[in-house]
Image (spheres, rainbow, N blue to C red):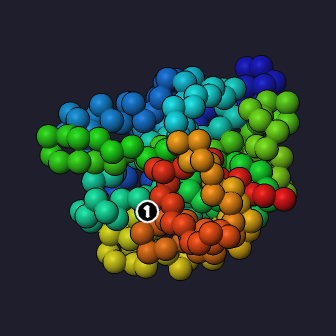
Amino acid sequence: MTADSAQRPPLDEARIAAGARPGLVVEVVAEAPSTNALVAERARQGAPEGLVVVADHQTAGRGRLDRTWETPAGTALTFSMLLRPTLPASEWPWLPLLTGLATAEALTAMGYAAGVKWPNDVLIGERKVAGILVERVDTPDGPAAVVGLGLNTGMTADELPVPTATSLSLEPGPEGQPDRTDVLLGVLAAIRERYDAWQGGDDVATTYAAACVTVGREVRVDLPDGSAVEGTAIAVDASGRLVVQAAEGRHEVGAGDVVHVRTVA
């Protein structure tokens, strides 16, 4: 075992199997181009809700707008969860938001100062530690959602993909290197708990807005047609849209309608 492999051990499959929350079945693969693609295929084959595929090393992860990235082995958590919501499709835009909220709550419980940036990022301070991609998949059993998450755990400053990113190992929190297996189990349990509460009618909007660092800030929202909206982010509405008060009036923008949301200094 090299010094690097000792500091970045593989995920502990035995602990994951023993500690996974009821309602989740977690499969670990050593390496995969994209866990979202794996779970989408399994969904089309009839896999049940609660399947989670986690890659010890993901080599071609995908984000919003087909952005791709690869992380050094052992430095991140990359997984996808299969969900089959019974709520109307009009409610599904809440899935990336509640996933981010649950992830931030789990990290906060571990001792990190985490928050959510609308619509699909988790931050520590002003830096991105996790990103979320939710995809709708048509299956023989009806539409399903594949919820993918990439969380930087052990990257050094030199390994970060962009200057605005961070990892758990670089932030104030528990002493020592974060244990990826413990972090995985905590985040998965929090996501499943939030999802089940949402399915049961829980009003996630108020809790999300309180945790959302975007609300209350001056922002620029870049739209697919090249235009932009600038103003104050004043709320997240009941449909999960960001409400921006601009000089010319109020705008409600959905996650699928934006290219970037940036804070304006």
Which of the 4 image quadrants contains residue 197?
bottom left
Foreground residue among 2 and 144: 144
Residue 108 seen: no
Seen as rendered, the residue at the extreme top is 2
Which of the 4 image quadrants contains residue 161?
top right
Measuring from the top left, give residue 117's x and y in whole percent.
Answer: 65, 59
Which of the 4 image quadrants contains residue 212?
bottom right
Provide the residue designation for mark 1: 94
- The quadrant the N terminus occupies is top right
Seen as rendered, the residue at the extreme front is 248
Amino acid on which the number 1 mark rests in the picture: Trp
Q: Residue at x 71, y 49 (%)?
A: 128
Q: Which type of secondary structure does the marked residue at label 1 adopt? A: helix
Foreground residue among 64 and 229: 229
Q: Residue at x 57, y 23 (%)?
A: 59
Is residue 12 placed above or below 214 in the rendered structure?
above
